[in-house]
Image: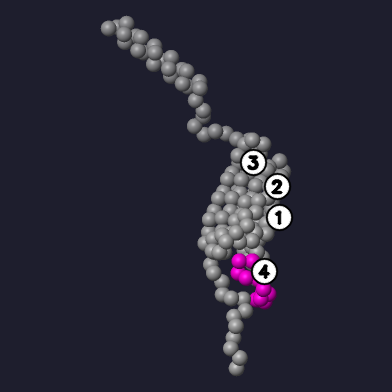
């Protein structure tokens, strides 16, 4: 009985030693500073005058992103021009980081989806995805009866 108890204690001690040597730390450390992302989608034109030949589905949107890195100035990415039903993607390298911006406006112009992924080499720093419903606007030039 004593030998069995001793064998169990030694086995548990060996298991704890091996497990302790092969586990990852509870809070992994990183030399990369924290990265924040902000995305903005808006109609490319806010002019009240719209050409008659252009329908609601042909109005482009601008999708822009700002990358915020701790300890440095914000970096604004060049805006993407996105037409409803035609997703757009742009990959940019900034300060050793690779930033991929993907934007899509639904074909009927009612919803927008964005995704921003930031890598440094093979390491993923952040990934942000969003889906928003776009508020339908009033006609830019409502037809008024002649008086």
Q: Nearer the viewer, residue 22 or 107?
A: 107
Tell me: 26 left or right of 82: left
Marks 2 and 3 sit apart, C-alpha to C-alpha, by 11 Å
The numbered disc on residue 119 is 3
Point 65% across, 54% down: residue = 88
Residue contact between numbered discs 1 and 4, judged by CB atoms under 8 Å: no
Magenta span: chief secondary structure: loop
Marks 2 and 1 sit apart, C-alpha to C-alpha, by 9 Å
Is residue 29 a member of the stretch shown in magenta?
no
Q: Secondary structure at mark 1?
A: loop
Residue contact between numbered discs 2 and 1, judged by CB atoms under 8 Å: yes
Earlier in the chain: of badge 2 and badge 1, it is 1
Tell me: 65 left or right of 132: right
**Residue that badge 4 annotates:** 45
Is residue 50 a member of the stretch shown in magenta?
yes
Point 29% across, 6% down: residue = 2
Marks 4 and 2 sit apart, C-alpha to C-alpha, by 25 Å
What span is in magenta? 47-58
The C terminus lies in which quarter of the figure? Answer: bottom right
Earlier in the chain: of badge 1 and badge 3, it is 1
Earlier in the chain: of badge 4 and badge 3, it is 4
**Residue that badge 1 annotates:** 78
Residue contact between numbered discs 1 and 3, judged by CB atoms under 8 Å: no
- The crowding category of the residue bearing disc 1, from other C-alpha atoms within 10 Å (few below 14, some 14 to 19, many at least 20), is few
The N terminus lies in which quarter of the figure? Answer: top left
Provide residue 77's location: percent of width, then percent of height: 69, 53
**Residue that badge 2 annotates:** 92
Residue contact between numbered discs 4 and 3, judged by CB atoms under 8 Å: no
Q: Secondary structure at mark 3?
A: strand
Residue 116 seen in the current view: yes
Q: Decide: is 51 above or below 18.
A: below
């Amino acid at each position: 009985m004593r030998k069995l108890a001793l064998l169990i204690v030694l086995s548990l001690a060996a298991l704890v030693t091996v497990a302790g040597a092969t586990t990852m730390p509870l809070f992994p450390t990183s030399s990369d500073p924290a990265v924040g992302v902000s995305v903005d989608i808006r109609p490319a034109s806010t002019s009240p005058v719209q050409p008659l030949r252009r329908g609601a589905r042909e109005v482009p949107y601008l999708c822009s992103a700002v990358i915020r890195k701790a300890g440095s100035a914000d970096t604004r990415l060049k805006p993407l021009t996105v037409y409803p039903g035609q997703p757009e993607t742009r990959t940019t390298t900034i300060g050793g980081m690779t930033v991929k911006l993907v934007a899509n406006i639904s074909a009927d112009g009612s919803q927008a989806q964005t995704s921003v992924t930031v890598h440094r080499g093979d390491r993923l720093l952040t990934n942000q995805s969003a889906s928003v419903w776009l508020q339908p606007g009033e006609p830019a030039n409502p037809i008024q009866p002649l008086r």
